[in-house]
Amino acid sequence: MSLLNIGMSGLNAAQGSLSVLSNNIANANTSGYSRQQTTQNANASNPYGGVYIGSGTTLADVRRVYNEFLDAAYQNSTALNNDAKAYSSQASAIDKTLSDKTTGMSSVLGAFFSAVQTAASNPSDVSARQVLLTSAQTLSNRFNAISGQLNQQKESINGQLGTMSDQVNQLTSSIASLNKQITQAQGSTTTAPANLLDARNEAVRSLNELVGVTASEKNGIFSVSTGTGQSLVLGDQSSTISAVPSQNDPSQYTIQLNAGGGTSIDLGNVLSGGSIGGLLRYRSDALMPAINDLGRIAIATADTVNSQLGQGLDLNGDFGVSLFKDVNSAVAISQRSQGAAGNSAGSGNLNVSISDTSKLSTYDYKVTFSSGNNYTVTRSDGKAMGAFDTTTTPPPVIDGFTLALDGKGPVAAGDTFQVSPTANGATGIGTQLTDANKIAFAGPLLGEGSKTNQGTGTFTPPSLTVPIDIDGGAATAQLRTGIEHSMPVKMVFGKPATDGTQPYTLNDAQGNPIGTGTIVPGQGNKITVAVPMRDASGTLLTPAQSFSFDTTVGGSPADGDSTSFSFNAAGRSDNRNALALLELQTKASVGLADGSGGGVSLVTANSRLVSTVGAKAASAITDTTATGALLKANQDARNSVSQVNLDEEAGDMIKFQQYYTASSQIIKAAQETFSTLINSL
């Protein structure tokens, strides 16, 4: 009977091992499956004739081949790789949009200034002016189109965050359920079914594909939390997350942890890893700065072009009007800020006006009120911009913009507002001028030397000392009227003095002296002429007002030589303002991205935007390659321990088959021995 029992124990052990081995082979392609091994223990030995003889074997355990350290590394690299892939896929799309010759801004900006150059060479050619209008329309349309694509990508990210949040909730619920099943299956034992452990590990890995988490084990139970410690799974209980509009900016969704009891925690600024972390990182690091930068370039383009056209005269002899929509229209001003969801009832909003496009940054701003009038401004890069008062007149300029209450309601202490000065710039730009004759190419003032002059005196074309504010309202209208009706001004030179100087006098249109001075013949003499302003009837304004223009006198005028400076009403062939407009192609009119000093041209600003986004896209590709290699290495390391090796299993199968056969022979031998013994008796 002892020999029979020994054979049966070996037969059972071999059969159990073959079953485990067969299960390994069947699950060779099952995701997250860890191969299993059997372990055997020798049965107790029995005394026999002064010695101990064994009584067979026992199948002691089915061991799950698993290395916690290697699996943790695999989980972490999964989160990093999916973060990098999500960032890279989004960044590559925006990079292609901005850098492509057919879809980017470079070609249309170049075409616009090329049209300006063509029109400037023949300012009276209406067809060339019409081409310029068409180029301006194409330019604004391209700004609108690219802005639309970027905002569409922002909306797509909102949708993806919502879908992924639901997937996270399914996985955390599954992990909590598996925790419960494992606890129930263990009972009073120290081991749990391997299939449940594998399913739980695979659920955590899938969760890391969506968001970076940390799983810690205690008494066989997993607790899962985000990288910054917010709990998602605790025992058999799980918390849910949801994608909801941000309190500061409803156009951007954030991730909210629903902690129970009606409380919620905003995780948007602390989540990292996984596809969710990659999308959030991309949006804050690349997408929103690109939207703001593109809007900044659009605002600078519209404002500088409009301002320059406002300095000249059109084919009708009238002062220029805006080519593009006003950057400070009522709609634009109201759309640049957003009150927080928790603000006091009736708190209204902030009016944000652009005062200096060269000082605008690519950041957003948070405005926090400490009382009805006092507020502080903090930039999105963390820089404190200072404390201010809404009653200050004129309002303080903050990175090129000013703030004012819209007057719709009182603001209470603690109310906050999100200010985005440039975010809607590319969306809002558009052309409004349709009459090519109204493009102001001519300079407003004209200088002409008398035909009877005898000397060699020269002068430069007169230019206004202070630019005309095209959006200055009544003040601008009064200045333009004054320039038109206060001219001409005549400059008459006297006899050179013994000290090497030469006097001159200035007379207004009625011959009244309005100024005197001296020049040094043979040198460049800059002269600033102040002209008393008159209304349309020719009457001096009360109180007295004046405007000034500059000219530079060179050469040696003769005694009695004169020059008349007049309003250039018939300057159809004058292209001075057109040339000034063309200079905007290279003129530093856009500040640095952080709003600090210095500046670049419109073309260079666009090139910098393309380069910045391109660099981030290239870096994202590099990150994806690096994290992919790390993931592959960690996966291979984990698989080298836990993955089913079919060659190894095939070898073990032969071994256990032989083991089974040998055990069967023991039983057969026991039967034959027993039969021989019976027959002999």
Image (spheres, rainbow, N blue to C red):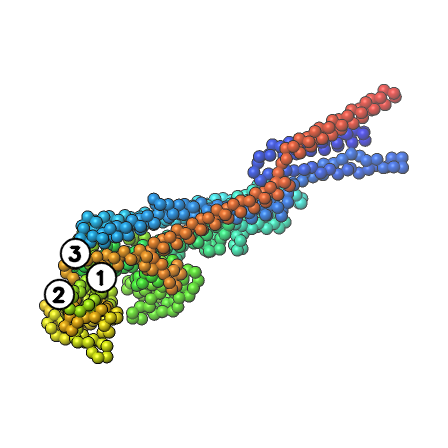
Q: Residue furthest top?
A: 679
Indicate whether 22 appears above or below 408: above
Cα distance in 3D space between marks 2 and 1:
29 Å
- Residue kind at label 2, given as amino acid type: Lys
Identify the residue under disc 3. Answer: 572
Q: Residue 311 bears which disc, if any?
A: 1
Q: State the image quarter where residue 473 is shown.
A: bottom left
Whether residue 474 can be seen here: no
Image label count = 3
Whether residue 216 can be seen here: yes
Give how far across and how far down residue 521 sits, in percent.
23, 72
Q: Residues within 10 Å of mark 3 (few under 14, many from 20)?
A: many
Quarter the C terminus occupies: top right
Task: For the residues labelled 3 and 1, say whether their Cβ atoms are less than 8 Å apart.
Answer: no
- Residue kind at label 1, given as amino acid type: Gln
Residue at point 28%, 64% (across, down): 407
- Residue kind at label 3, given as amino acid type: Arg
In the displayed structure, does residue 197 sit left or right of residue 290?
right
Identify the residue under disc 2. Answer: 451
Badge 2 or badge 1: first in the primary sequence: 1
Callout 2: helix, strand or loop?
loop
In the displayed structure, does residue 635 sit left or right of residue 249?
right
Q: Return the residue nearer the eye: 441 or 16.
A: 441
Q: Return the residue nearer the eye: 371 or 435.
A: 435
Cα distance in 3D space between marks 3 and 1:
15 Å
Indicate whether 59 appears above or below 327: above
Residue at point 50%, 52% (across, down): 272
Mark 2 or 3, closer to the camera = 2
Residue at point 31%, 68% (across, down): 395
Callout 1: helix, strand or loop?
loop
